[in-house]
Amino acid sequence: AQSVTQLGSHVSVSEGALVLLRCNYSSSVPPYLFWYVQYPNQGLQLLLKYTSAATLVKGINGFEAEFKKSETSFHLTKPSAHMSDAAEYFCAVKGDTGRRALTFGSGTRLQVQP
Amino acid sequence: DAMVIQNPRYQVTQFGKPVTLSCSQTLNHNVMYWYQQKSSQAPKLLFHYYDKDFNNEADTPDNFQSRRPNTSFCFLDIRSPGLGDAAMYLCATSSRGSTDTQYFGPGTRLTVL
């Protein structure tokens, strides 16, 4: 079965500081991995996805993530946080063959302090 | 712009009173999903349609039903809402492609009084 673990339900950074949101996955087959962002009372917006091409994936709003098979990780980073980055971030995996649905992590709420 | 639309954005219903949530898409995607998201939790898949084929998750309560009359529209029916059904309901779509990126609508927040 596929699963996702997001370490840290809340992360707080200062504006301009590095953002690092952690995601570890489990999958019985090579996975597809996704990061979504959710602003209050809104749906999920795709930030980036890994689909077995380049291991370093660049997304929207300056975010990127690196797929590390040996560590089963797909951590999300941004060099310099902006106030507008404050939101909930979800990592998701699609791995098991025959299962179309995504499995989401429990989410990480990012706070950006001025 | 191609998009996923959900109506209404906010829905208030009474305990036990049936309610229907609507989702439409202009992406011409084959697959449509309904997720339930409770406060501070991850989205939980209720069911999805692959074209007209309905796929129910094993733990989705019978109280939840869905209809997909055509490619563009999908409905979520809650036959007898309970207080525990208060949540954000998210609709998503994807194509048949192998990456299966899901595109989400803005959600409908359901309140049960």
Image (spheres, rainbow, N blue to C red):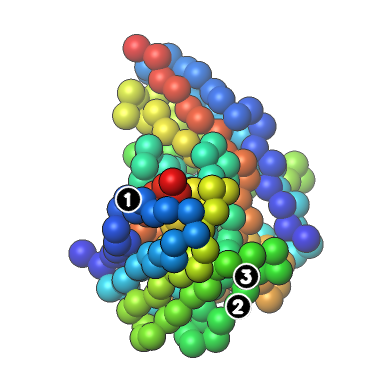
Q: Residue at x 52, y 39 (%)?
A: B39
Circle 3: residue type? Asp
Q: Residue at x 37, y 30 (%)?
A: A85
Residue to which mark 1 is pinned: B10
Circle 1: residue type? Tyr
Tell me which corner region of the image, top left, top right, bottom left or bottom right, holds residue A102: bottom right
Tell me which corner region of the image, top left, top right, bottom left or bottom right, holds residue B3: bottom left
- The mark closer to the camera, 3 or 2, is 3
Query: What label does residue B55 carry, if any?
Result: 2
Q: Is residue A63 visible?
A: yes
Q: Position of residue B25 (x, y in %)?
A: 31, 71
> Regarding mark 3 in the picture, which secondary structure is present there?
loop
Q: Is residue A113 above or below residue A42?
A: above
Query: What label does residue B62 carry, if any?
Result: 3
Q: Chain of mark 1?
A: B
> Regarding mark 2 in the picture, which secondary structure is present there?
strand
Closer to the camera in the image, B1 or B14: B14
Circle 2: residue type? Asn
